[in-house]
Image (tube, helix red, strand yellow):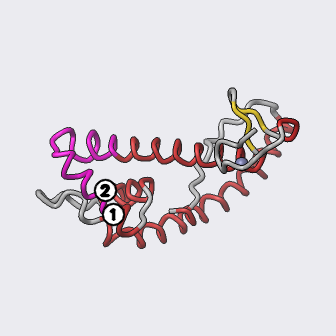
């Protein structure tokens, strides 16, 4: 039979079955990786849009104009949706800058790299805090065995931004 991805022959006994079709194991793996990536991307795009529409502009925004900017940044600079969202959150939220009318999200290319740097620093601080908390927790467990209520620290893969 023929592998639907690479169109080469594949033996049924050696193939990986997905639904009714048979793939080379490596083709099947590649496929599931790609699907995962595009799922992540879809989710990140949704989060970026939600943030811009509901939080940043409180529904008073021309989304087609914004989305045109978003796709320009993605295509021209290779920015990730999550990186753009974090950049806006950093610039308007953390730094407390005020919005300027008519600029849309044009600040992103000016702040993207600085945001990355900032988040790297924060993540480093958090992970050293985390080490500390783990030690504390062990001590607590010996005395009063109760469920830990430590907040989970969300991990962001900065190198992929
Ligand atoms: Zn194949």
Would residue 34 appear left or right of 14 to someone viewing this image? left
Give the class, few, some or many, for how many residues have Cα within 10 Å of label 1's Cα (few <14, many ≥20): some
Task: Please provide percent x and percent y for residue 11.
Answer: 83, 41
37 versus 129 height, above or below: above
Q: Which residue is mark 2?
A: 70
Residue drawn at the location 26% of the way across and 58% of the way down:
69
Helix, strand or loop under label 1? helix
Checking the image for residue 20, the label placed there is: none
With respect to residue 156, does 150 lie above or below?
Answer: above
Can residue 135 be found in the magenta stretch?
Answer: no
* Relative image position of residue 13 (x, y in whole percent): 88, 36
Q: Position of residue 15 (x, y in %)?
A: 81, 39
In the rendered image, which residue does mark 1 sit on? 73
Q: Which residues are magenta?
A: 49-72
SS at mark 2 in the image: helix
- Asked if residue 17 is positioned above or below residue 55 in the image, the reply reads above
Say left or right for 104 vs 138.
left
How would you rate the neighbour count of disc 2 (Cα within 10 Å): few for under 14, some for 14-19, many for 20 or more? Answer: many
Name the residue rendered at 26%, 47% in the picture: 56
Relative to the observer, which residue lies in front, 92 or 35? Answer: 35
60 in the magenta segment? yes
Q: Is residue 95 visible?
A: no
**Considering only vertical position in the picture, is 108 above or below 15?**
below
x then y, percent, for residue 146: 76, 30
């Amino acid at each position: 039979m023929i592998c639907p991805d690479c169109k080469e022959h594949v033996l049924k006994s050696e193939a990986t079955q997905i639904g009714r079709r048979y793939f080379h194991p490596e083709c099947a793996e590649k496929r599931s990786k790609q699907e995962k990536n595009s799922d992540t991307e879809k989710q990140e795009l949704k989060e970026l849009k939600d943030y811009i529409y509901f939080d940043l502009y409180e529904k008073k925004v021309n989304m087609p104009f914004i989305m045109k900017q978003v796709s320009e940044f993605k295509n021209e600079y290779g920015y990730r949706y999550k990186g753009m969202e974090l950049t806006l959150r950093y610039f308007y939220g953390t730094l407390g800058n005020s919005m300027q009318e008519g600029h849309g999200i044009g600040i992103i290319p000016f702040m993207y790299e600085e945001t990355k740097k900032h988040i790297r620093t924060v993540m480093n601080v958090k992970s050293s805090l985390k080490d500390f908390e783990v030690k504390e927790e062990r001590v607590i467990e010996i005395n009063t065995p109760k469920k830990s209520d430590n907040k989970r620290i969300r991990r962001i893969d900065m190198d992929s931004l």
